[in-house]
Image: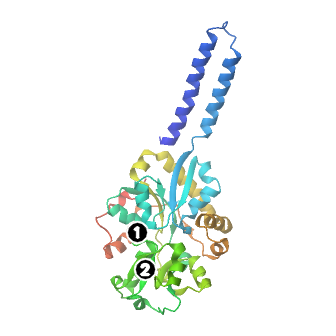
Amino acid sequence: MGHHSSGGAAWMQRPKSREKATTSRARSSRPSGTPSALALALASAFAAFGVASAHADAYKLHMACTATADCASAMVARDEGIFAKHNLDVDLKLIGINTNIPPAIVSDSIQIGGPTEPVFLQAVSGGLDLVAIAGATIMQPSSNESIAAVARTGVTIKDAKDFVGKKVGAPGIGAYLHVLFRKWLVEKGVDPKDVNFVEVTFPTMSDALKSGAVDAVLTGEPFITRMAKAGTGEVAARYVADLARSEPVISYVSTRAFAEKNPEVVKDFRAAIEEAAAIVNSDREKTSEAVAKFTKLPIELVRISPANLTHPALKASDFGWWLETMKQQDMLQAPIDVSKLVVP
């Protein structure tokens, strides 16, 4: 059994033993069969303490995602009380760069994170013993269309070869948008090494374009619309739509040690994500509210973004295309045993 379920049992046992000892001491100075008022009060108090403990053993989890709707199922699970319903007390944090998530998991500053698949696979290839415990979003036509390379206003980029020599901001080198953009460049006959990539967080991309720090950024909605309205940039390429894939985008990941030590927590987390995913895939307004709250983006912008498709079920073979793509880009330090990537 997992940590949080056994913890509750231990709490429940203590009050009983203490109640018994207290009552026996009280009885030693009184006639048999006539418990003192103090003993009754203590028994009542300890019984109440036991009941309170049963409700207070929700497992505390620290979790992090970037400012993206790909973790919408976690956001909804928190805001709608679904985590709490499944005995989890989840502190969901906003993290700036996706590639910072695996180190945060390994250092135990968070126990679960939402890295993009390339970041997850690179971490595993680099020697971190991480496992996927549940699926978040998958690629699909409408969300693929909501991702783009946005060129700074005044910079002319009409096709892949126009990116040669340009400085392009990505929300994590080696992360999802970066890897897919390099895949797209290769398919268009452009060597990714001829493009200068730098890391820029989603919320600062518009300013990076405006200041001229970068020539283009790799981003998604609602940031694309925000940049267009601000006049800082315009769509140069819908590169993910061009690739037309249906693989997972982000998975919820922990260390293998955490997952093996806390199987009940993993089970509860999966149940909560599955329940929240049904809301994400059917209730746009509720989802938009949760995403706006977490990302600190205006809800009007979140509402106009294409809906993401959340798919909690995850199997090892879902990572096959990603591994092939990353091998092409020399991103893997060591071979990965695909069969060990997902917790059973």
Q: Report x, y in % for residue 340.
A: 36, 57
Front residue of this view, candidates 140 and 238: 238
Residue 4 appears left or right of 76: left
Q: Secondary structure at mark 1?
A: helix
Q: Earlier in the sequence, mark 2 or mark 1?
A: 1
- Residue drawn at x 60%, y 13% is 25
Residue 315 appears left or right of 45: left
Measured along the vertical axis of the image, is residue 268 above or below residue 216?
above
The amino acid marked with disc number 1 is: Pro
Q: Which residue is mark 1?
A: 118
Label 1 environment density (alpha carbons within 10 Å; few <14, some 14–19, many ≥20): many
- Residue drawn at x 48%, y 73% is 246
- Residue drawn at x 65%, y 73% is 303
> In the rendered view, how is the structure colored?
rainbow
Query: Would you identify the image quadrant in which residue 103 lies?
Result: bottom left
The amino acid marked with disc number 2 is: Phe
Q: Which residue is mark 2?
A: 181
Q: Report x, y in % for residue 79.
A: 64, 57
Measured along the vertical axis of the image, is residue 264 above or below residue 172?
above
Front residue of this view, candidates 142 and 20: 20
Q: Secondary structure at mark 2?
A: helix
Q: Is residue 30 visible?
A: yes
- Residue drawn at x 41%, y 66% is 119
Label 2 environment density (alpha carbons within 10 Å; few <14, some 14–19, many ≥20): many
Q: Report x, y in % for residue 205.
A: 51, 77
Query: Would you identify the image quadrant in which residue 30 lies?
Result: top right
**Alpha carbon of mark 2 to alpha carbon of mark 1: how far?**
12 Å
Residue 276 appears left or right of 337: right
